[in-house]
Amino acid sequence: MNVKVIKKSRLWLTVAFCGLLTLSAAQAERKRTLVAGQGARYVATIKTSKGTVRFRLFNDTPIHRDNFVRLAEQGFYNNLLFHRVIRDFMIQTGDPESVEASQVKVYGEADAGYKLDAEILPHYYHRRGVVAAAREGDAENPTRRSSGSQFYIVVGRIQNDSTLAGAREKIAARAADPTAAQITPEREKVYRKQGGTPHLDGSYTIFGEVISGIGVVRRISELPTDLQDRPKNEDIHIKNIKIKLVKGR
């Protein structure tokens, strides 16, 4: 083979190899610089026995965001049931004891063993698809601290004059800040068109929203249930949750 050809081949191989190294270094640098709340956000992919749901976690609820990410990455939610399912309302999971899937036990009392300080923000409200932390009632929990692991995804229903009037009364009586949680004209349009559970506004921490798979959530919510709101013909469980950090706010 011509010596010049050999030298050129070596040169091109060297250039290509250096290019790959540079690309890998750049990719690694981009990965290192992704920080939640600083130009990046977490997306959770929940694989359930009924399909896949993806939702993004809000950066301005960092206590709930980081707690959820930690539990999901530890596999805490794997095989847990959606133990509370209510048509036109929501689906709820996160009780670690539900992994037993006992047919006689009522689930919903257990969690990760600790509570989270409330992060109830006025710009989030209970439209269809939001993800919020479950908690104990106001009498036992006046500061509205959240369960360490239980959460729900809102399905809700299309609102009308009557249901909105009732929701406004409940917000005035129960919300942490009734003024901040009031149903504005903009929110009312969303509730009338998309649906939700406005009577919960201002009382629970909302820390995420569904970005795909709301049909899966709806189908789960429509299953026949027993007197404890647990699906009675089949158990619906979380297979696993994958967390990914992506660019975006």
Image (spheres, grey):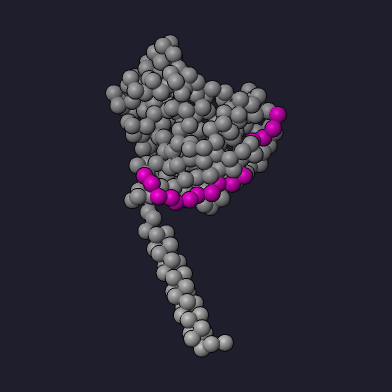
Q: Is residue 228 visible?
A: no
Instruction: Please report the residue visible at 42 percent of the width from the left and 21 percent of the height from the top.
Output: 191
Q: Position of residue 12 (x, y in %)?
A: 47, 77
Instruction: Please report the residue visible at 67 percent of the width from the left and 35 percent of the height from the top.
Output: 235
Q: Is residue 58 visible?
A: yes
Q: Position of residue 59 (x, y in %)?
A: 37, 44
125 vs 179, nearest the viewer: 125
- Is residue 93 shown above or below 20? above
Q: Position of residue 232 (x, y in %)?
A: 68, 28
Outermost residue, front side: 2
Outermost residue, bottom side: 3
- Is residue 41 shown above or below 6? above
Instruction: Please report the residue visible at 37 percent of the width from the left and 37 percent of the height from the top.
Output: 118
186 vs 173, nearest the viewer: 186
Instruction: Please report the residue visible at 36 percent of the width from the left and 34 percent of the height from the top.
Output: 120
- Is residue 233 shown above or below 112? above
Q: Position of residue 83 (x, y in %)?
A: 60, 33
Outermost residue, top side: 162
| In-image side of 132 versus 249 (left or right) | right
| In-image side of 97 versus 138 (left or right) | right
| In-image side of 2 versus 191 (left or right) | right
Q: How many marks?
A: 0
Q: Residue 63 in magenta?
A: no
**In the rendered view of the protein, which quadrant contains the C terminus?**
top left
- Is residue 39 shown above or below 196? below
Rendered image quadrant of residue 227? top right
**In the rendered view of the protein, which quadrant contains the N terminus?**
bottom right
Q: Which residues are magenta?
A: 233-249
164 vs 92, nearest the viewer: 164
